[in-house]
Image (tube, grey):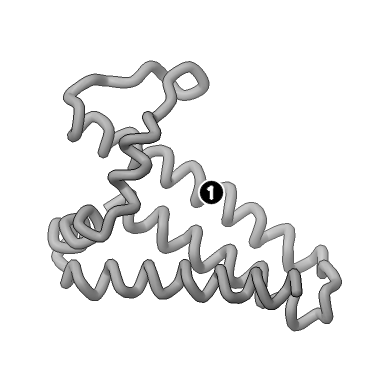
Amino acid sequence: MWLVFGFLVFAVATGACAASVLLAGGKVAVAVILPLAGLVLASGAILEFGLRRLHVNLTGKQLSPWPLGFVSLNTIGQAMLPSTMFEAGDRIGLNGRVVAATLYGLLIADLILLMVITG
């Protein structure tokens, strides 16, 4: 649940940041960006929690407390796979395919917005 929620919050917050910059004509509206930046940071914390739980499920090993213990790149790569998103969606009672398609759609939309903004 935390992994899906973290990816969802991250994708929505970064998309909203990019859309606000695009709508402001390339200028940063501080009153809009600061709360959204806080939301992006919060999504990072949620993702860290979800990735740590996934790491324990995959390896069976507990990590050290946060600044000392890092999630492996293998776990991060596994978290981004569609099969993991399907399974996570199914575990929280939603259609896994819909969850994966929604999250990947949001991330692709964010990437397109980034390319439009940067020219």
Other residues around mark 1 within 10 Å, as few (<14) / some (14–19) / many (≥20): some
Look at 19% across and 62% down and name the residue there: 86
Q: Would residue 93 appear left or right of 104 to someone viewing this image?
A: left
- Residue 49's quadrant in the figure? top left
The residue under label 1 is: 42
Residue at image point 37% right, 68% down? 103
Q: Residue at x 66, y 55 (%)?
A: 37
Residue sitting nearer the eye, 106 or 44: 106
Question: Which three-letter amino acid code belongs to the residue tagged 1?
Answer: Ala
Q: How many marks?
A: 1
**Residue at 64% across, 61% down:** 36
Say whether residue 27 is left or right of residue 55: right
- In the rendered view, does 26 fall on the left or right side of 87? right
Quadrant of the rendering where the C terminus is positioned: bottom right
Pinpoint residue 8: horizontal percent, then vertical percent: 41, 63
In this view, the residue farthest toward the front is 119
Occupied quadrant, residue 76: top left
The picture places residue 111, in percent across and down from the top left corner, at 56, 69
Residue sitting nearer the eye, 7 or 59:
59
Q: Is residue 102 above or below residue 52?
A: below
Image location of residue 14, percent across then percent down: 59, 64
Q: Is 59 located above or below residue 90 in the figure?
A: above
